[in-house]
């Protein structure tokens, strides 16, 4: 018996209203020793996430570790987008052990979480494994994470995937939320983010809009 295809998306694909985004410890001190990804690429990918979350109205939780005594301020790519957002500062390396952060997760009330942070093997790995164990669906934005070595980053990503996390990328996240160029309400949001931060893809979008009036 042959299978009949249906024109509908997979349930595992993200949509703007079915998840929350958690950005963990994208701070100066944590970035200084991040070697698994170029810092410019990392900041660009974090900018894509922040602008996408704001443009698609995704509930977003920001958290830092020892902001005033050790790790310093968040990337401006985050604070420029969310200048008045609440930022939960912690002492725990695993943010999932912080009562204030968990209170915010529960207040958002989403069973599906998109998570990334510095470093991948510590401040990202802990919450991802903990959330998975408690029954959450978790997606990790691997190119908005980084670690002291490529080895540390890759082993952490493998560990999270083995536990059930789903890996995605920042530009993939943007595309997955838009998913259809006919969605006019977020078309300008998507193309503006792509043009500013999307590298060659963004240049291509700018080219076709300028040369051929694409819309």
Image (cartoon, rainbow, N blue to C red):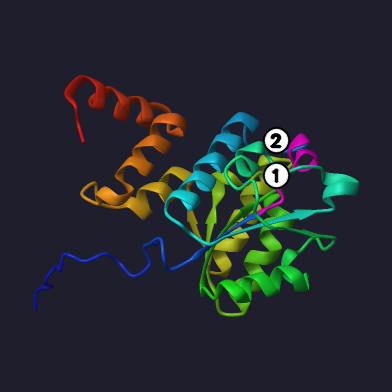
- Residue 107 position in % (x across, y down): 61, 75
**Residue displayed at 61% across by 38% down:** 77
Marks 2 and 1 in Cβ contact (< 8 Å): yes
Q: Residues within 10 Å of mark 1 (few under 14, many from 20)?
A: many
Res. 87 image quadrant: bottom right
> Seen in the image, is 88 located left or right of residue 70?
left
Label 2 to label 1: alpha-carbon separation? 6 Å
Question: Residue at label 1?
Answer: 147
Question: Residue at label 2?
Answer: 35
- Residue 172 position in % (x across, y down): 41, 47
- Residue 151 position in % (x across, y down): 67, 45
Q: Where the N terminus falls, by quadrant?
A: bottom left
- The region drawn magenta spans 24-32
**Residue displayed at 51% across by 47% down:** 49
- Residue 48 position in % (x across, y down): 50, 41
> Seen in the image, is 19 located left or right of residue 201?
right
Q: Secondary structure at mark 2?
A: loop
**Residue displayed at 61% across by 39% down:** 80
């Amino acid at each position: 018996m042959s299978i009949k295809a249906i024109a509908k998306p997979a349930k595992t694909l993200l949509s703007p209203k079915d998840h929350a985004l958690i950005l963990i410890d994208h701070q100066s001190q944590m970035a200084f020793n991040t070697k698994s990804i170029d810092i410019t690429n990392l900041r660009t990918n974090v900018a894509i996430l922040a602008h996408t979350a704001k443009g698609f109205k995704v509930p977003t939780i920001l958290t830092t570790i020892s902001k005033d005594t050790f790790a310093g301020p968040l990337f401006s790519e985050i604070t420029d987008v969310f200048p008045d957002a609440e930022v939960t500062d912690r002492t725990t390396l695993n943010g999932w052990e912080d009562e204030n952060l968990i209170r915010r997760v529960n207040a958002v009330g989403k069973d599906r979480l998109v998570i990334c942070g510095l470093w991948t093997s510590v401040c990202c790995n802990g919450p991802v494994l903990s959330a998975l164990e408690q029954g959450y669906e978790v997606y990790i934005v691997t190119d908005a994470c980084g670690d002291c070595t490529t080895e540390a980053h890759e082993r952490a990503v493998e560990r999270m995937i083995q536990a059930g996390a789903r890996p995605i990328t920042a530009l993939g996240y943007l595309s997955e939320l838009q998913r259809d160029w006919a969605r006019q309400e977020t078309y300008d949001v998507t193309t503006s983010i792509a043009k500013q931060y999307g590298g060659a893809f963004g240049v291509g979008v700018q080219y076709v809009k300028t040369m051929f009036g694409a819309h």
